[in-house]
């Protein structure tokens, strides 16, 4: 790890970031990651940011004036499950301590795992599978159900290397969806207890929060962006605190990252 620039207090596992930031459209999720890369480059750090871009957000913003001069980013734009795995495999070979591995956005990965399983098991798209299932049920002949253990295995095949099998930092993002505390499709008690106070939860697999140390909700308002802590291990908690630069306002002030 470089001994110059914006960086963690040490290269030990206790200072390795595992972060999930989530929020609605325009809440600053992609900007948070880009601000880290910009601050890193401005301060002379040798860290590289390896980014799995799922919706061309990074590609678009790197073409603008604010972040257009960044040269510390390796970017892979992905579409399906196989693309995600290929990008992750590539980045795992490149990452050194102090680097960042980012997936923006991570929420759709759970759905991609389901689609990947269906294509492999039944040879049809996810949409065609569920349409056939519906038609079979209407005829009184239930369609074969999916094997969730295999889907979970696909999910773990991506998440374990992403979060654990390298020595870099991790930041993933997710959209926000309403917490459902009542009704047929209500969320689990764990989800309600964790996210109920803010009314929204991250999109994607329900146990995503267990894979990270930090969960931060970002919101956009009339006076700028704010961050609210959902979970953070051994760090100060925030409620609607203003954030102009995620690196300075969270990593510098709260996580005690150094800059010299």
Image: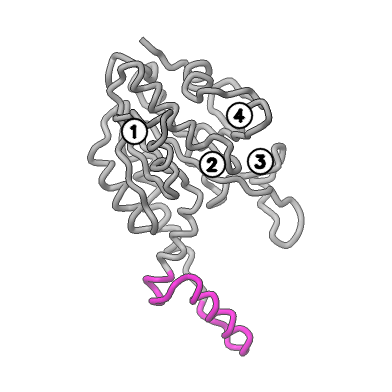
The answer to whether residue 122 is magenta is yes
Q: Which residue is mark 1?
A: 49
Q: Earlier in the sequence, mark 4 or mark 2?
A: 2
Relative depth, front residue between 106 and 137: 106
Query: Which element carries disc 1, helix, strand or loop?
Result: strand
Q: Left of 29 or right of it: where is 34?
A: left
Q: Give the residue displayed 44% in from the left and 36% down from the top.
A: 171
Q: Earlier in the sequence, mark 1 or mark 4?
A: 1
Query: Which element carries disc 3, helix, strand or loop?
Result: helix
Q: Which residue is mark 3?
A: 195
Q: Give the residue displayed 40% in from the left and 71% down from the top.
A: 119
Q: Residue 237 in the image: x percent, y percent? A: 61, 24
Q: Residue 203 in the image: x percent, y percent? A: 57, 49
Distance, label 4 to label 3, CA atoms, is 19 Å
Q: Nearer the viewer, mark 2 or mark 1?
A: 1
Query: As drawn, which residue projects farthest toward the bottom?
Result: 139
Q: Which residue is mark 2?
A: 209
The answer to whether residue 102 is magenta is no
Q: Earlier in the sequence, mark 3 or mark 1?
A: 1
For the residues bearing labels 4 and 3, Cβ distance under 8 angstroms = no
Instruction: Report the quarter where the N terminus lies.
Output: top left
Query: As drawn, which residue projects farthest toward the front?
Result: 65
Q: Residue 188 in the image: x percent, y percent? A: 66, 51
For the residues bearing labels 3 and 1, Cβ distance under 8 angstroms = no
Distance, label 3 to label 1, CA atoms, is 29 Å
Q: Give the residue displayed 30% in from the left and 30% down from the top.
A: 72
Q: Read off the magenta span.
A: 118-144
Relative depth, front residue between 178 and 79: 79
- Badge 2, how many Cα within 10 Å: few under 14, some, many 20+? some
């Amino acid at each position: 790890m470089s001994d110059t620039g914006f960086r963690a207090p040490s290269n030990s596992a206790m200072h390795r970031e595992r972060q999930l930031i989530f929020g609605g459209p325009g809440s600053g999720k992609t900007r948070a990651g880009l601000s880290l890369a910009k601050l890193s480059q401005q301060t002379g750090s040798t860290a590289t940011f390896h980014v799995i871009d799922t919706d061309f957000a990074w590609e678009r913003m790197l073409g603008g004036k604010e972040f257009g001069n960044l040269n510390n980013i390796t970017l892979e734009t992905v579409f399906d499950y196989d693309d995600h795995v290929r990008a992750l495999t590539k980045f795992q070979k490149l990452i050194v301590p102090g680097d960042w591995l980012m997936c923006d956005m991570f929420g759709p990965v759970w759905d991609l795992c389901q689609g990947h399983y269906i294509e492999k098991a039944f040879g049809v798209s996810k949409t065609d599978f569920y349409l056939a299932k519906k038609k079979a049920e209407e005829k009184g002949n239930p369609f074969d159900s999916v094997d969730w253990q295999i889907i979970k295995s696909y999910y773990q095949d991506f998440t374990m290397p992403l979060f654990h099998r390298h020595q870099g930092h991790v930041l993933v993002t997710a959209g926000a969806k309403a917490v459902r505390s009542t009704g047929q499709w209500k969320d689990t008690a764990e989800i309600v207890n964790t996210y109920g106070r803010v009314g929204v939860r991250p999109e994607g697999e329900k146990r995503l929060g267990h894979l990270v140390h930090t969960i931060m909700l970002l919101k956009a308002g009339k006076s700028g962006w704010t961050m609210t802590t959902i979970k953070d291990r051994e760090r100060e908690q925030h409620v609607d605190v203003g954030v102009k630069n995620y690196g300075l306002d969270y990593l510098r002030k709260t996580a005690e990252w150094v800059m010299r």
